[in-house]
Amino acid sequence: MTPFEEFVREHLPIPPARLLEVGCGQGELTTALAVAGYDVLGIDPAAPLGDLFRRLTLEELEEPDPYDGVVAARSLHHIRDLDAALDRIVELLRPDGVLAVEEFVWDRLDEPTLEWLHEQQHARGGAGEVVAPTSAAALREEWEGEHLGLHGEEPLRLGLTTHFEELAFVWTPYLYRFLGNGAAEVLEQALIDAGEIQALGFRYAGRPKPS
């Protein structure tokens, strides 16, 4: 079970609750939740084929019955009209339903975190695993270019606060994913805990605010 699946199962209603995953990607989480006993649907324009999935966007989804929970794993920062998407999620949820989110906030990359990321890439480059940027400045330019146009911390946090009452929030490591090195997660978490680098990931759970 992944850490986010554990978070989802901790904060959402128990099976066989009816769940929706927004931006399900290749469907790993949707499938895991179905195996756990949930009545779950995963949506994504590139969703896999199968009974658990539909190839469509959140805006295109039409459902007469509300969901007990909605899950969004690193998908909200891609949605252009975030406010409209969160409005739609509120509409799809029962009044006591729960939204569970795992997100990535690229704009929290401060200088100490940038330097650590560059060191990690340089080490992997020395081992022949990747071609690392020549300097931290070059990495900064590459990083900002790759993430330009994606929602950062302020719009994500503000959108969630505006639409939902917070039940849980925790900062989490993310850069190990960017590095493609799961072993770096423990080191990243230790440095976050020590206050030496920033956490660029978070998990959140909330209920719709009363209208």
Image (cartoon, grey):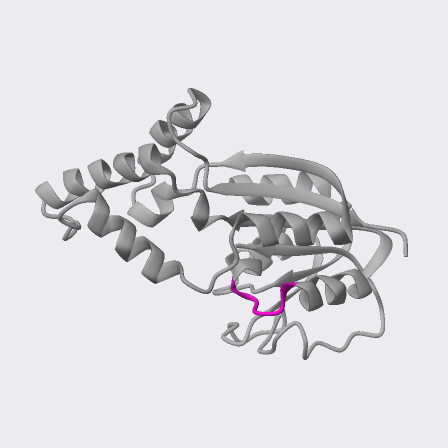
Measuring 24% from the left and 50% from the top, which residue is drawn there? 139
State yes or no: residue 81 in magenta: yes
**Residue 59 as seen in the image, left or right of residue 23:** right
Residue 15 at x, y percent in the picture: 75, 49
Residue 16 appears anywhere in the view: no
Give x and y (percent) for residue 73.
56, 54
Image side of residue 130 versus residue 7, left or right: left
Query: Between residues 169 and 186, which one lies in front from this camera angle?
Result: 169
Residue 114 picture location, percent across and down: 30, 40
Answer left or right for 109 relative to 153. left
Verify whether residue 37 appears in magenta: no
Write the start and end of the magenta stretch as one range.
78-82
Q: On the rendered image, what quadrant is the C terminus found in?
A: bottom right
Residue name at image x 59 percent, y 42 percent: 203
Q: Residue at x 46, y 65 (%)?
A: 149
Residue depicted at x 34% and y 49% = 178
